[in-house]
Amino acid sequence: MRNRACSHPDRNGSECSRGYSGTRVLHGDEADVFGDAGYQGVEKREENLELPVTWHIAMHPSKRKALPKTTVGELMEKLEHAKASIRAKVEHPFMS
């Protein structure tokens, strides 16, 4: 598999392949941020540690599929569905 070039001016290719910084998608007035599984760990990145936002990042599909068939697992599945629904409602108008 070929490595894609990183388009971020302050990062090399390996840093870009590990995930997104998150700050480039924020405008400054957010209290809650919803992201897909590609944003895993964004709240731990140095540039995001002091941001006054709550991150709601989707679970990786393999972990979601492996949720237990218990009440807790079903609640977690509903939470993941809600996060995806909110993200889709705000993301899709920008895709056209």
Image: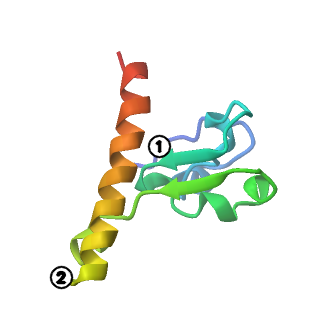
Q: At 54% across and 59% down in the image, what residue appears? A: 18
Q: Position of residue 31 (x, y in %)?
A: 67, 44
Q: What x and y, as percent, mark residue 44?
A: 68, 65
> Are the residues tagged 1 and 2 within 8 Å (C-beta)?
no
Observer-nearest of 13 and 74: 74
Say which of 2 and 36 sits in front: 36
Mark 1 falls on what kind of element?
Answer: loop
Classify residue 40 as left or right of residue 96: right
Residue 94 located left or right of residue 49: left
Question: Going by the picture, which residue comes out furthest to the top?
Answer: 96
Q: How many marks?
A: 2
Find residue 53 and report its horizontal and vertical position in percent. Answer: 69, 50
What's the amino acid at mark 1? Arg
The residue labelled by disc 1 is 4
Up the image or down, 88 lies above or below 54; here it is above
Between circles 1 and 2, the one closer to the viewer is 2
Q: Earlier in the sequence, mark 1 or mark 2?
A: 1
Task: Kindly state the secondary structure of the residue where label 2 is placed.
Answer: loop
Q: Is residue 84 visible?
A: yes
Residue visible at 47% across and 43% down? 4
Figure quadrant of the N terminus: bottom left
Q: Which residue does the numbered mark 2 point to in the structure image?
A: 69
Alpha carbon of mark 1 to alpha carbon of mark 2: how far?
Answer: 39 Å
The residue at 64%/48% (across/down) is 21
Q: Nearer the viewer, residue 83 or 45?
A: 83
- Determine if residue 1 is in view: no
Using the rendered view, name the quadrant where residue 70 is placed.
Answer: bottom left
Residue 69's x, y, as percent?
Answer: 18, 82
Q: Quadrant of residue 8?
A: top right
Mark number displayed over residue 30: none
**What residue type is disc 2 on?**
Lys
* Residue under the image location 63 percent in, 55 percent down: 54
